[in-house]
Image (spheres, helix red, strand yellow):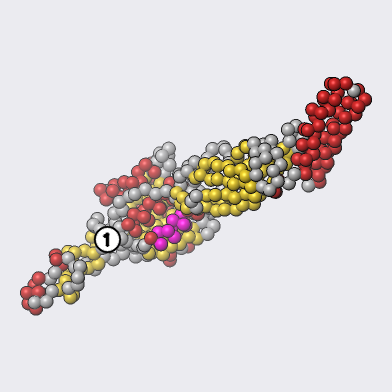
């Protein structure tokens, strides 16, 4: 602060000395050239002195963001309205956004250069392309200006905080349950998750809307009253999705896959749950519906690869939340013998267990990983290796297998 004050005083003295010097030179030297030099420098010198006292906080900033909820990869257009009361002529004005997080791709910032002169209202517009997933806060707008000579440079940071939430992108995939359990036993199934019309457990009174194929005709022949068959409803069709938050280059792909799987499960009519642990625990119990899906999307929008302990440690410490009678889908990009052993223990009460191993397209799997796949299969765990190009068919290939 002291250095800035000294620099400001030095600039004032420099401009004053130049003005006094050119005036003295004109007075003592006389002639056209000396007076021309003085009058030519006079407006620039006076402008520099006036610039020193002009308050940049006279500007009022208003940021307009059309949408506060976006999907990753979308383009976001932002308008900044700058208004002021004093029409002081500004030769140039640089407006720069200060945004938390890694919003901008490559090496560029939201910076605009304009020449407002006497304008009292300035509208700036810029676009953020391919905005990444996460919660991004637009903290403030910094204004910078100066004089013609470059002697005076001023800046002011105007607070205008706004937050946007960018949800992860997702793909449409056809979720297929790995296994279905009935009271009569266990069988594989790939039909819709509602009820099994081949297993009638009783009859009830006919209700409007019941299908004709559900009518119990033998009972109707005996009693002359319409009766409808009651079918065995499937159990344990819910899915608990566990996301590994270990830092990895494939983490964003893992988030996309998690969002896609959960949407696919809910779209099929089943209940979906979500669990992940890093610096904070994110947990959504088994439910269905649009509001539940939005809650999970909110978690996935804010999730970060901040897991310090190993994945098997997280599973062991949170087995009570993860171990359900539902199907269990774990999404990870790092697999070890210890993690497979722990998954096997956690999934004892689960209907079925599946590991979605997400790898970066440039990564090639070695022989050790193939051995881990065999270990998982020996424990009854379905292991599917995929990258982002194969997400849409991840359950189709499991079904074929």
Q: Nearer the viewer, residue 324 or 258?
A: 258
Q: Is residue 184 visible?
A: yes
Nearest the viewer among 37 and 379 is 37
Residue 250 location (% of width, % of height): 45, 45
- Residue 164 is situated, as x and y percent measured from the top left of the image, at 52, 52
Q: Which residue is mark 1?
A: 193
Q: Could you tell me which residue is drawn at 62 percent across and 37 percent down?
A: 113
- Residue 313 can be seen, yes or no: no
Against 271, residue 2 (above or below) is above
Residue positioned most to the bottom = 223
- Apparent side of residue 263 relative to residue 222 in the rendered image (left or right): right
Q: Percent from the top left, x then y, of residue 170?
A: 39, 49
Q: Is residue 64 left or right of residue 347?
A: right
Q: Residue furthest front?
A: 32
Q: Residue drawn at (41%, 62%), measured in percent from left and top?
A: 291
Quick check: is 295 in the magenta stretch?
Answer: yes
Q: Find the residue positioned furthest to the right.
A: 28
- Residue sitting nearer the eye, 220 or 278: 220
Q: Is residue 255 magenta?
A: no
Q: Is residue 255 left or right of residue 110?
A: left
Residue that sits furthest to the left in the current view: 221
Is residue 314 placed above or below 110 in the rendered structure?
Answer: below
Residue at 65% from the left image edge and 38% from the top image edge? 116
Residue that appears at 8% across and 72% down = 218
Q: Label 1's element? A: loop
**Dot 1, how many residues are within 10 Å of its Cα: few (below 14), some (14-19), or many (20+)?**
some
Q: Overall secondary structure of the magenta stretch?
A: helix
User: Which residues, given as a range, are shown in magenta?
Assistant: 291-300
Residue 299 image point, x, y percent: 47, 57
């Amino acid at each position: 602060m002291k250095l800035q004050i000294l620099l400001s005083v030095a600039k004032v003295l420099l401009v004053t000395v130049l003005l006094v010097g050119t005036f003295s030179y004109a007075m003592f030297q006389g002639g056209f050239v000396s007076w021309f030099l003085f009058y030519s420098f006079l407006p620039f010198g006076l402008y520099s002195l006036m610039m020193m006292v002009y308050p940049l906080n006279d500007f009022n900033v208003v940021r307009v963001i059309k949408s506060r909820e976006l999907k990753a990869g979308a383009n976001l257009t932002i308008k900044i309205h700058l208004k002021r009361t004093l029409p002081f002529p500004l030769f140039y004005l640089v407006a720069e956004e200060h945004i938390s997080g890694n919003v901008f791709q490559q090496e560029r910032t939201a910076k605009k250069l304009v020449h407002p002169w006497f304008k009292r209202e300035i509208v700036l517009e810029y676009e953020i392309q391919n905005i990444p997933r996460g919660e991004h806060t637009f903290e403030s707008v910094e204004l910078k200006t100066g004089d013609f000579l470059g002697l005076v440079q001023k800046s002011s940071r105007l607070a205008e905080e706004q937050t946007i939430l960018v949800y992860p992108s997702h793909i449409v995939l056809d979720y297929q349950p790995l296994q279905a359990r009935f009271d009569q036993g266990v069988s594989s199934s790939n039909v819709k998750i509602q009820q099994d019309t081949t297993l009638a457990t009783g009859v009830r009174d006919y209700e409007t809307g019941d299908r004709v194929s559900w009518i119990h005709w033998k009972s109707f022949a005996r009693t002359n009253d319409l009766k409808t068959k009651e079918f065995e409803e499937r159990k344990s069709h819910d899915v608990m999705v566990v996301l590994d938050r270990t830092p990895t280059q494939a983490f964003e792909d893992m988030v996309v896959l998690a969002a896609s799987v959960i949407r696919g499960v809910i779209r099929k009519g089943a209940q979906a749950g979500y669990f992940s642990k890093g610096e904070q625990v994110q947990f959504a119990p088994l439910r269905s519906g649009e509001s539940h899906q939005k809650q999970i999307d909110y978690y996935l929008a804010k999730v970060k690869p901040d897991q310090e302990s190993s994945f098997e440690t997280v599973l062991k410490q949170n087995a009570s939340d993860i171990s359900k009678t539902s199907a269990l889908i774990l999404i990870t990009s790092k697999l070890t013998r210890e993690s497979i052993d722990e998954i096997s223990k956690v999934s004892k009460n689960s209907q079925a267990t599946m590991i979605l191993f997400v790898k970066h397209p440039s990564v090639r799997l070695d022989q050790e990983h193939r051995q881990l796949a065999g270990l998982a299969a020996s424990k009854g765990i379905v292991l599917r290796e995929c990258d982002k190009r194969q997400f849409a068919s991840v359950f189709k290939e499991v079904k074929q297998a």
